Amino acid sequence: MSTKYSVLIVEDDEFSSAVLERNLSFFENVTIESISTNVKDAIEFLSLNSVDIIFLDIELPDGKGFDIIPFITGNPTVIVLTGDEGYAFSAFENGVFDFLKKPFTPARFKTCMDRIDQSKKKKEVINDSPILFVKSGITHIKVNLNELLYVEAVNDYAKLFLQNGKNILINLSLKELLQKIQHHSFLQVHRSYVINMEQIELVENDSIHIKGFEIPIGKTYRQSFQKVLNK
């Protein structure tokens, strides 16, 4: 595994958390960004940060691990950890990548990590092209992502704003679109806006200026935006 991965662990059991940390310690390209022991802390962390992999326990003191999934931004790989096989169906219904039944062996854990690596590399190859075909109504339209300024959420749809002055309402939500374009230079800066970082002309107070448009920076996205901006 050569690609670097940031990790969030959501686990309230100290022993299980320690086992997971030890297994991850054998992968030099993995950094544990945070360990949350309950739903509330995990949601607060995810409102300000994004990670590549989330290891998610199900039985938490203040709810179920599944309660966190709607608050996840970007497209991290979610791995469910539980001693109860009865959660397997719910896990895959929620779109998780893998289901690790506790206690798991180091060999099973390595298989999981290898699968994550292979899956992400395939996505990077697929997402490397700047051309994206999107559906608007019944029409498929080719969009050059290099010419996409920003995207705005419009109810359950997304509106694309292009360099040529055109805008296109497409049959995808903002979250669904972000999953397709996040490997390019796009970043969510507000619950209703995703911007092309390469198109930024000015950042002033809590606003981003792009080709005459002013995009607000949401409070919960401010820290992650500054982190990317300062790289």
Image (cartoon, rainbow, N blue to C red):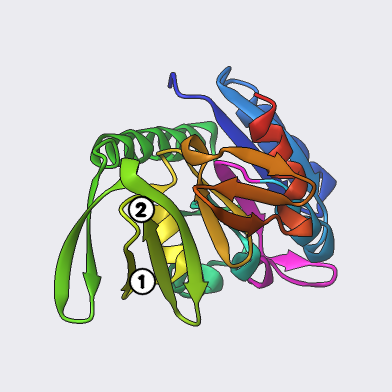
In screen coordinates, is 142 left or right of 64? left
Front-lying residue, 14 or 30:
30
Quick one: 95 or 72, which is closer to the camera?
Answer: 72
Residue 64 painted magenta? yes
The residue stretch that appears in magenta = 50-68
Residue at left 32%, top 63%? 166
Q: In the structure shown, which secondary structural element does the residue marked by tag 2 occupy?
A: helix
Quarter of the image where the N terminus is located: top left
Asked where in the image residue 104 lies, by quadrant, the reply is top right
* 116 with respect to 155 (left or right): left
Corner quadrant of residue 167? bottom left
Residue 10 in the image: state x and y as whole percent.
Answer: 72, 52
Residue 198 seen in this snapshot:
yes
Q: Is residue 206 above or below residue 2?
A: below
Q: Where is 128 relative to 48, above or below?
A: above
Residue on which disc 1 sits: 172
Instruction: Give the residue displayed 29% in from the left and 42% down from the top.
Output: 127
Residue at image coords 55%, 71%: 87
For image coordinates 57% across by 38% down, the residue present is 201
Residue 180, numbered label: 2
Comes first in the chain, label 1 or label 2: 1
Give the distance between the C-alpha atoms of the residues marked 1 and 2, in whole angstroms. Answer: 10 Å
Q: Position of residue 80 (x, y in %)?
A: 56, 57
